Image (spheres, rainbow, N blue to C red):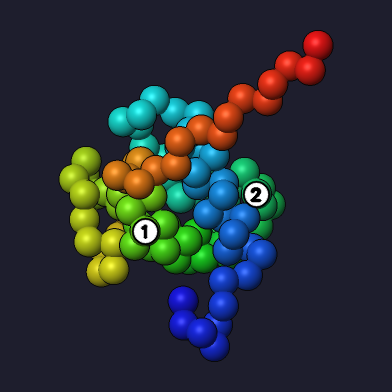
């Protein structure tokens, strides 16, 4: 995003949820952006689809996710139509397990 329109709390929430849902899937599995917005806003998900696609673009620009169509990676900056998201080369490792204090 440009400096005049910084990434906000909703944007971070979308990005975090994309990563969270991908982490719950097999390493080569994909998710649909609609899964992300349905999880966060089950009653108003349609209005959040474009922000979710923008979050996917930001994560793809960092290499965190890949944007795919028909199973093939596509250019994150210029895709059109239905997409799926998969783990990118820079997908973050899982957070360290909390140590048992007992």
Counting the numbered discs, the total is 2
Judged from this view, the residue extending furthest toward the top is 102
Numbered badge on residue 62: 1
Numbered badge on residue 98: none
- Residue 11 spot, x, y in % from top left: 58, 63
Residue at left offset 42%, top offset 63%: 58
Circles 1 and 2, Cβ within 8 Å, touching? The answer is no
Q: Is residue 88 visible?
A: yes
Numbered badge on residue 40: 2
Viewer-closest of 4 and 82? 4
Viewer-closest of 98 and 40? 98
- Residue 19 spot, x, y in % from top left: 49, 44
Packing grade of label 1 (10 A; few <14, some 14-19, many >=20) is some
84 sits to left or right of 17: left
Residue at left offset 62%, top offset 43%: 39
Q: Is residue 28 above or below residue 82?
A: above
Q: Is residue 85 visible?
A: no
- Residue 7 spot, x, y in % from top left: 57, 71
Identify the secondary structure beneath mark 1.
Answer: loop
8 sits to left or right of 100: left
Q: Is residue 1 above or below residue 66?
A: below
Viewer-closest of 46 and 7? 7
Instruction: Kindly report the distance in space between the C-alpha atoms of the residues bearing marks 1 and 2.
Output: 23 Å
Of badges 1 and 2, the one in the foreground is 1
Q: Which tag, 1 or 2, sits closer to the chain's start?
A: 2
Residue at left offset 53%, top offset 54%: 15
């Amino acid at each position: 995003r440009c400096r005049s329109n910084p990434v906000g709390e909703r944007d971070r929430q979308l990005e975090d949820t994309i990563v969270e849902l991908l982490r719950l899937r097999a390493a080569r599995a994909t998710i649909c952006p609609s899964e992300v917005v349905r999880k966060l806003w089950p009653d108003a998900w349609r209005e959040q689809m474009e922000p979710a696609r923008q979050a996917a673009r930001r994560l793809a620009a960092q290499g965190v996710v890949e944007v795919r169509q028909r199973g093939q990676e596509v250019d994150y900056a210029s895709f059109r139509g239905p997409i799926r998201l998969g783990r990118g080369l820079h997908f973050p490792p899982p957070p360290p397990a909390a140590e048992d204090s007992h």
